[in-house]
Image (tube, rainbow, N blue to C red):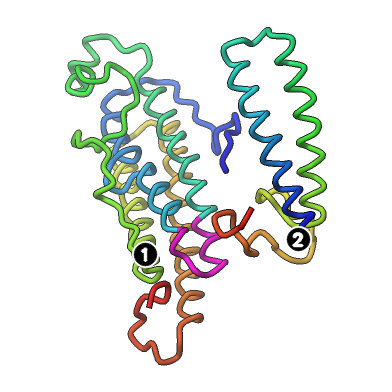
Amino acid sequence: MFYYQKALQYPINIKTPNPAAAKIIIAQLGGPDGEAGAAARYLNQRFAMPYKKGIAVLTDVGTEELNHEEMIGSIIYQLTRNLSLEQIKASGFDAYFVDHTTGVYPQSASGEPFTAAAIQSTGDPIADAFEDMAAEQKARLTYDNILRLVDDPDVKDAIRFLRAREVVHFQRFGEMLTDIREHLDSNNYYAINPAFD
Amino acid sequence: MKEQKQLIKSIQVQSFSMLDTALFLDTHPCDADAMAKYTSTREELAGLINTYEMRFGPLTTSGNYCTDSWQWIESPWPWERQV
């Protein structure tokens, strides 16, 4: 079961509102490689994972993604406080504003609502492990792109923390894949699903 | 195994009691009866969790009391457990 701890995983203290930055950082809340999808992916993949190290990694990373979802929400919240209508119009935040005011809504930077269509849970731990490693790389490069587009050091500090976590998760998922391979039947040359056949 | 199952059952009961009391307190923060219930449940639950983790292993990643091995990864996981 899950319960909530009333503390962010890493502090977010943004002094200057910036709706243009919020518009792109929301990619990592509800976008195709965002934190909401990451949590849904790993926490649901656990049920098809036959090996204990894999279950622990999926549980612990999936849970951490919920922390990151909260961190991105906090960034969006702080970037969109006390906005004037002039700022909203000039920053291009008006299209988001008309639908959600300054509420935090899981969507991609291009406005696509969060969809589980961007994630997989295949029932095959090898396929899932490759998906997970790819997902961590995609999230890492999204953070790299955000770092290219945003100047505020308060924002960049938190984004750099999140980026570093993607790197660590990629490493742990790689080790999870190695562990799965070590469990395979020696005749399973092409690594066909060990969880079903 | 029987004792482990009984302990888990008690933890589930007390955890749910705590959760539901907390939810009630969210909208009734000054209710004295609910606060008393919360306080007694919290103490009981903390004791149960401590007993369980000392004897049977961690319930969260901060409850691995064994100092020379990481028991967190050991089976069964909750969806595998027959309670």
Residue A67 x/y as whole percent: 50, 39
- Who is closer to the viewer here, A46 or A109? A46
Residue holding disc 2:
B1
Q: Residue at x 70, y 62 (%)?
A: B71
Task: Give the residue type that dot 2 points to.
Answer: Met
Q: Residue at x 26, y 30 (%)?
A: A23
Quadrant containing the N terminus of chain A in the rendered view: top right
Residue A181 image position (x, y, % from top left): 45, 79
Q: Which residue is mark 1?
A: A123
Where residue A114 sits, quadrant-wise, is: top left
Please say if A104 is above or below B74: above
Q: Amino acid at mark 1?
A: Gly
Given the image, what chain letter belongs to the residue carrying mark 2? B
**Where does the magenta region start and end?**
A46-58
Q: Residue at x 50, y 69 (%)?
A: A50
**Which image quarter is the C terminus of chain A in?**
bottom left
